Image: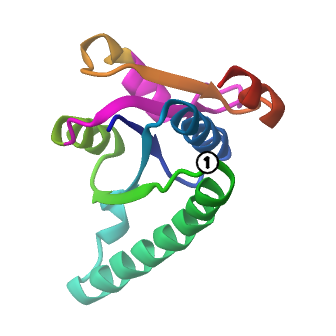
Amino acid sequence: MRKFLVVLDDSRECLNAMRYAALRAAHTGAGVQILSIIPPEEFQHWMGVADLMRAEARERIEAHFEVFAKWMRDKQGVNPELVIREGDPATEILAQVREDAQIGVLVLGAGTEKSGPGPLVTTLSRSSGTLPIPVTIVPGDMSKERLEAIT
C-alpha cells in the first residue's frame, strides 16, 4: 500500500500537512505514516538525564500523535502509523524514505512567517530534484474548506 509520509512537529503548519495527508489517503486508499524526529541537541546532558529526557520526548510525541490518529481514524477512516527517529530532521526524513519502499509522497507544511516556509521545506526543496518521491508542500494558512476541496 502506498503511504503518505507527514512530519509531526510543534509547528502550526503541521496541522494542515496532517489534514492533507489524511484526506488524500482516504480518497486514494493509501496509508499515512507520521514521522516525528527528536533532535540530537535535546540529549547533550549526562547519560541518566538524557535517557529521562528521551523518554519524556517520546511520551509527548505519542500523546500528540494520538490526537491526530484519533481524528484520522474517526473522520477519515485512516489508521496512521507512528515512527519516531532521533537525529537531524532532514537526514532522518530522507533515511525513512529510503528505508520504507511503500512511502510514495512526502507531505510538508509551509510556514507563513516572513522568514520563509520553515527549515524543513527550505532544506528538502533544495534537494527535491534528487528525491526518490514527490514532495507536496501544503500552505500553513490554507483553510480547512480549501484543503477538503482540493483533496
Residue 74: which quarter of the image?
Answer: bottom right
Q: Where's the C terminus, which quadrant?
A: top right
Residue type, mark 1 in image: Ser
Q: Quadrant of the N terminus?
A: top left
Horizontal and vertical percent for residue 125? Answer: 42, 19
Q: Position of residue 8 (x, y in %)?
A: 50, 52
Element at badge 1? loop
Q: Which residue is under mark 1? A: 11
Where in the figure is residue 55, as x and y percent of width and height? Answer: 36, 81
The image shows residue 146 at horizontal and vertical percentages of 79, 26
Q: Residues within 10 Å of mark 1 (few under 14, many from 20)?
A: few
Quick one: which residue is furthest to the left in this view?
A: 99
Between 150 and 27, the one lying in front of the other is 27
Q: Is residue 65 left or right of residue 143?
A: left
Tell me what residue is drawn at x 27 percent, y 53 percent.
Answer: 87
Q: Residue at x 58, y 44 (%)?
A: 18
**Residue 104 figure quarter:** top left
Q: Residue at x 61, y 64 (%)?
A: 70
Left or right: where 86 falls relative to 79: left
Q: Which residues are magenta?
A: 100-125
| Residue 99 belongs to magenta span | no
User: As displayed, is residue 60 above or below residue 149?
Assistant: below
